[in-house]
Amino acid sequence: MTVANFLEMNPVICLASLCHWNWHHLDGNAKDMMDISNLCTQFTFTGSTDESWFYLIPTAIENKGARGINAILDGIAGVGNNDIVRVTQALCNISQSLQESIALLERMYERCDPHVFYWNFRKYMGGWNDADEFPHGLKYEDGGNGQFFKFSGGSAAQTPLIQAFDIALGIKHYPTGERGLQSSVVEARQRLANMADGEPVPPPANAYVLSTRDYMPAGHRRFLEDLAATCMIREFVLLNCSTAVVTENGDADQRAELRQAYNQCVELMKTFRDKHIMIVSRYVIAPAKAGPSIQGRAGSARDGDEATAKGTGGTDAIKFLRQMRAETTNTSIR
């Protein structure tokens, strides 16, 4: 508890401890030091290569995708200077980062068997938010003051990278089961007006998504909070790419490129979520249905499978991810 308080994080296993802080290089002289083939985990629960690979995929994604953070900051600077070309280039760089992240996510199947994941080491990643064996949570002897605490386990939703992309693109996520609208031109003008008045207001967010930030390093959490309050890339695209604006100005091609670059980023975010849903279907739903027997392994599961899958973070994983995907798709600007 003392260490967690110092780090300003919840005292439980999380994505940062499993992936971001749990690797080392195999070859100190490699051409690409952070290529996934040059990474190895420092600690696993089972000693299996499947578990190690499962942790290294998010590690590699965070590294390769991190250049997209610089692109986001460059896009924000472009918005501040009313520079369409700079914002367009920033969005193109975000697209490249997302493409690299998707390519890495697709490599999950190379060295991690779904059956081994589900029946061998997945249990170690869960928390005690709604665990049957810990109905009241757990007590911490170090600084817990005799209280019971309930915490979720490690989850891909705890990645600051994907949340940063969501925020940069203005993709709103609402409470699971609820429907909401993505921001309009009118809302974009209002948010910019609030910004000019010195009252930056972050857009609404899914409560579970916000709660995952308590499992991130404090610096990452604060960065996302500041980004949500100040990033206006979507508002910039909306106001520059409405039909009336494009018609009235002579730089229609330039504005069309801006909109195309933005929509490509949104489409790639949707593709990333497609791949994530496929992984949950294959690594959680299929093995759960097949059972622990090796003979009962299932190689794949359809996206349309209606089985309920609880993620290690405690959510109804498929329902949660499908809604996030739909909200992403609805963000495109036409």
Image: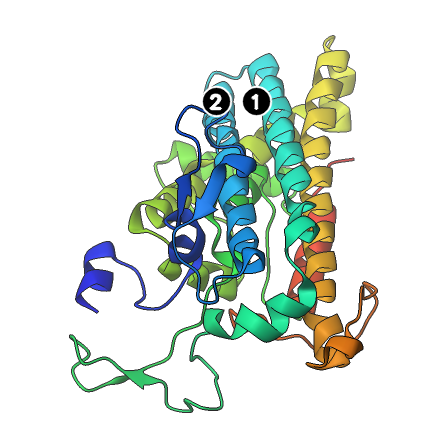
Residue 63 position within the rendered picture, expressed as x and y whole percent measured from the top left: 48, 36
Binning the other alpha carbons within 10 Å of mark 1 as few (below 14), some (14 to 19) or many (20 upward) gives many
Secondary structure category for the residue under label 2: helix
Judge whether residue 137 can be spotted in this image. Answer: yes
Nearer to us in this view, 243 or 311: 311
Outermost top residue:
250
Determine if residue 315 is in view. no
- Element under disc 1: helix
Q: Nearer the viewer, residue 184 or 171?
A: 171
User: The C terminus appears in which quarter of the rendering?
Assistant: top right
Quadrant assignment, res 264: top right
Reading the image, the residue beneath label 2 is 74
| Disc 2 crowd, CA 10 A, few/some/many (<14, 14-19, 20+) | some
At x 75%, y 20%, the residue is 256
Between the residue at mark 1 and the residue at mark 2, the CA separation in whole angstroms equals 6 Å
Apparent side of residue 203 relative to residue 252 in the rendered image (left or right): left
Q: Please indicate whether residue 246 sits to the left or right of residue 204 in the image.
A: right
Q: Earlier in the sequence, mark 1 or mark 2?
A: 2
Callout 1 touching callout 2 (CB < 8 Å) = yes
Q: Position of residue 244 (x, y in %)?
A: 75, 25
Instruction: Identify which residue, 329 or 138, lies in the foreground.
Output: 138
Residue at mark 1: 90
Q: Amino acid at mark 2?
A: Asp
Residue 33, position as x, y percentages in the image: 46, 28
